Amino acid sequence: MQIKNILERDDILTVLEKKNLLIKYKKAKNFLLGNHSELVDLKKRKPQKDEVWQFRIDKQFRAYCYFEKDILIVFHIDNHQN
């Protein structure tokens, strides 16, 4: 699947800045836009009927998102280790 654009909710950038993840997030975002989803482990979360996806920002944090056609919308940043 080709991702044409990635959008974030307004509060996501604030969370990323607060957790000092903005540079890592932008790098992961560029991988996704460059069709290298395997580098950030983009996968569908369970239960799969919910159509919620996740990708790795770094070893500790994940971004939760969903698709609207070929646009990925990020709605939550989560600490994967807690």
Image (tube, rainbow, N blue to C red):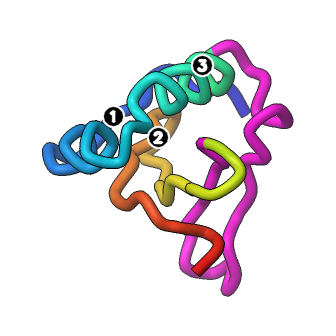
Q: Are marks 2 and 1 in contact (CB under 8 Å)?
A: yes
List the residue tagged with mark 1. 7
Where does residue 41 sit, x and y in percent of width and height?
79, 46
**Tag 3: residue type?**
Leu
For the C terminus, the image quarter is: bottom right
Dot 1, crowdedness within 10 Å: few (<14), some or many (≥20)? few
Residue plotted at (79% across, 23% down): 36
Residue stretch rendered in magenta on the structure: 34-57
- Disc tally is 3
List the residue tagged with mark 2. 72
The label number, if any, that marks residue 29 in the structure image: none
Q: Earlier in the sequence, mark 1 or mark 3?
A: 1
User: Where is 35 relative to 67, above or below?
Assistant: above
The label number, if any, that marks residue 33 in the structure image: 3
Dot 2, crowdedness within 10 Å: few (<14), some or many (≥20)? many
Cα distance between the residues tagged 2 and 1: 6 Å
